[in-house]
Amino acid sequence: MSKKHRVNWKGYIPTTITPFDEARQLDVPALHSMLEWLHAEGMHGLFVGGTTSEWTSLSAQERVDLFRASADAMRGKLPLLAGCTGYTPAETIALAQEAQALGYEGVVIAPPPYVRPNDKEILAFYQQIAKEITLPIVIYNWPAGTGIDLSVDLLEQLTDIDGVVGIKQSSPSIEQFIKTLFRLKDKVRVYGFRMDEHGLALLQSVDGDGTIGAGGVLGRYQPDFYNHIWRGDIDAARACGQKDIQILQRWYTPELIGRYGSSPAVLKVAFNMRGVPVQPYVRRPILEVEDTEIALIRQTLVDLELI
């Protein structure tokens, strides 16, 4: 049986932010409010501790605290995936073991950022991790954050590792995504479909798995993109997808870098505008969004009739 059938994660799974209070400490009540909002908006799962969560400014204990607080609110309600990217295998293994103890269903792991390991080292990195943990693994290709765009040939080698069940393909290259999809879709789940005409065409031609994306600030429109496709209502899916594309085009560069500040800062402002009690506080080196940029974020949400 294909490894992709070991898990049932499909649809839109947002990468959650980490709300902070004014002292830049984890704001658990705000976190729980945001997660409950995402659940009520129909998300198909949650990815906790990814890039958007500001994991690089959290201590190891704070990352576990974030896992625990999120699981306390959502365990048993939605599939939970834990972001366990680290600079060493030991760091990643320890986080994955904590996530498993807290009831997470899987882990999402990118190659170590900054280090820029070669293909042989990346393969050994994942092989070591897979030997030490039992949770299913999603490989996270995130060249904007790691400086490495995993080749399709390397991804195929990585999918030969028994514990690997999926790929979060976040290369900005649509060509890379298509190559990944058609090479590996029968072996593992492939995430990263765009909600544009390319994504619609691909999803109509294959039984695509979904998108593990940033934030979920659009609410129901992002999971409904997939819900409508599954029901065969392509026009309704297209209407949902157009809102997501507007967010991508206005708030991010083609390389998926934030135009008005780092993604967590922008999303926190946007969530607050949508009535979710998340404050704009972020941790250095990320800065809060400036007033002139806040107005541009608001205008996007007004134009999309979200506020």
Image (tube, rainbow, N blue to C red):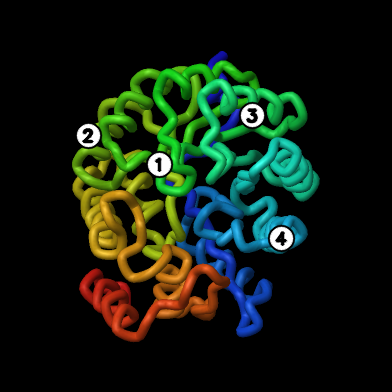
Q: CA distance from mark 1 to mark 3?
A: 20 Å
Label 2 vs 4, first from the N-terminus: 4
Residue 201, label in figure: 2
Mark pair 2, 4: CA separation: 42 Å
Q: Seen from this angle, which residue lies furthest top?
A: 1
In the image, residue 187 lies at what x, y percent? 49, 18
Q: Position of residue 151 (x, y in %)?
A: 40, 25
Sooner in the amino-acid sequence: mark 1 or mark 3: 3
Amino acid carrying mark 3 in the image: Phe
Q: Compared with residue 251, is residue 206 higher up or lower down, i.e. above or below?
A: above
At x 70%, y 26%, the residue is: 128
Q: Quadrant of the N terminus?
A: top right
Three-letter residue code for mark 1:
Ser
* Residue bearing mark 1: 170
Q: Mark 1 or mark 2, which has the lower sequence index?
A: 1
Q: Nearer the viewer, residue 107 or 227?
A: 107
Q: Secondary structure at mark 4?
A: loop
Which quarter of the figure is the C terminus placed in? Answer: bottom left
- Is residue 191 in sight in this rendering? yes
N-terminal of the pair, mark 3 or mark 4, is: 4
Query: Tag 2: Cα neighbours inside 10 Å, few (<14), some, or many (≥20)?
Result: few
Q: What residue is drawn where x is 50% and y is 58%?
A: 52
